[in-house]
Amino acid sequence: MPPPDQSKLKEKVRRLTEGPGVYLMKDRFGSVLYVGKAKNLKRRVSSYFQRSRRNMIQQPKVVAMLDLIYDFDYIEVNSESEALLLEGRLIKEWKPKYNTDFTDDKRFLLVRVDMENTLPRFRLVRFRQSEQSLYFGPFAHAGRLRKTLGELRLKYGILLSDASPTQLEDGRWRLYDDARAEIYGHENIVTEDEYRARVEQACVFLDGKSREWLSDLEDEMRKAALNQEFERAAELRDVLFALKGTIERTRKFTRQTLVMRPADPTPVLEELQRELQLRNLPRNIECFDISHVSGTYCVASMVHFTDGLPDKNNYRRFKIKSFIGNDDFRAMEEVVGRRYRRLHDEGKPFPELVVIDGGRGQVGAALKAFLLHELEPPPLIGLAKKEETIHFSDAREPLQLPNHSAPRLLLQRIRDEAHRFANTYNADLRRKRMKANVLHEFEGLGPVRREALWERFKNLPRLKQATLDELQEVEGIGPKLAERLHEFLQRAG
């Protein structure tokens, strides 16, 4: 196999941004050797290809890795803290040989809500056990968490793990048989539906609290990194990664369980209509997000919500066709134009509200798309992540809705779903690129047989472990080809 094209690598390095990001060093078979983060991508990645630096390295493990680097990928991010989080997520995904193992098994406390029970209780646990329960956390500050649960009981009248409610003859429930019935100041005898309404309110509050603590942890992590307390920063990163994953799982479950009962969405939509001064009730909302993939091109996602719930049949993914590179504004202009030009040509109605993941610049790019295609734009807003500020496409001043208001939570849920959908597309493309890089290096395999191999073995480790007999079970792989392929995969390491 030929050595890496140094001129091609240097040209790739020259195109790197000087902003923060994450890089993936790969061997000649496309396997990820190492994942690293960088404050300045160009400076950090270029250092791997400098002979002067190689002579200064004393660790044999690092020198050995440098000899194996054949190519690299990279992902641009907005901040160093985001790079720290993404590094951890990619280490967990790829498990590179030269990275210290990334683990998230630090057993911090979780709040579990037993949704499968008639009267769900809130309790502290250290492990996820029941898929029928809601989980919030993990939380590193146990004292603060216990205090918050006490506040929840007082504020919403929910049950903790120490309660023993009694069912009455008329089917209602007595929550407490002792002095707590008066201390907590809520109706002590309730129906199941009345109690579950309390649980829903408490879960919305706790979800907001999770994001608040997430922000606090990110601040702590940044301070630790600035003070060069890198072990502490990495520990906080691990907690943040686990917390973000749990919040995402909780939101998904919440949509299925809390949004959960067949409640009428109209009041929330009417409140959103008033807050945004919309002419029509926003029963159909579409949201766009742009995502960079390895810094080489952009992709986009669009999600569609009907009556406040995801309508996955109307989700869309986009590859950017009009240019090569990373330009969020041009990408947004293209995909918005493509979406609504097509709806117009097919005679289909536009949604009552379009949400853009971003600020005034992204909203302006989306509005430009309507003007270029001579289309009347529907109401159009941007939701900027940092402060959750709403930007309008007209001359109105930016708006911030109250933290835990139903319209704000709905917009956040829609934006987060668009972001999740874009990231899933991003990950799918990365996996396909990794798959293609390995078997494209082996002569004698066409696209049909390559796809058949991946369909049979699913991933690179299992493919490398395959025996000659197992390889020959794949259609189109005969004894001689299987033997050559087996030798090739063993050399891949």
Image: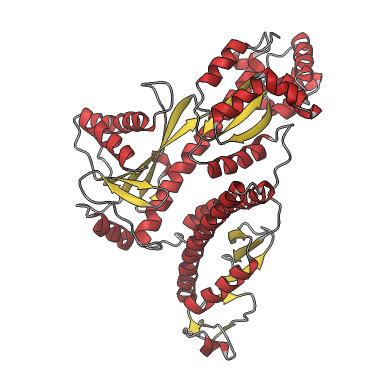
Q: Is residue 155 above or below residue 179?
A: above
Q: Nearer the viewer, residue 67 or 371?
A: 67
* Residue 120 horizontal side relative to residue 197, left or right: right
Q: Residue at x 57, y 16 (%)?
A: 10
Q: Residue at x 63, y 14 (%)?
A: 440
User: Where residue 269 sits in the image (x, y, percent)?
Assistant: 30, 57
Q: Residue at x 46, y 34 (%)?
A: 291
Q: Nearer the viewer, residue 473 or 405?
A: 405
Q: Is residue 162 above or below residue 61?
A: below
Please give the count of numbered marks on the rendered protein.
0
Tell me, yes or no, if residue 205 can be seen here.
yes
Q: Is residue 15 above or below residue 78?
A: above
Q: Quadrant of residue 427?
A: top right
Chosen colour scheme? secondary structure
Tell me, yes or no, if residue 118 can be seen here.
no
User: Where residue 373 sits in the image (x, y, percent)?
Assistant: 22, 28
Q: Is residue 317 above or below residue 310?
A: above
Q: Quadrant of residue 1?
A: top right
State which quarter of the image contains the C terminus: top right
User: Where residue 342 sits in the image (x, y, percent)?
Assistant: 29, 30
User: Where residue 491 sits in the image (x, y, percent)?
Assistant: 78, 17
* Residue 167 horizontal side relative to residue 478, left or right: left
Q: Residue at x 68, y 30 (%)?
A: 34
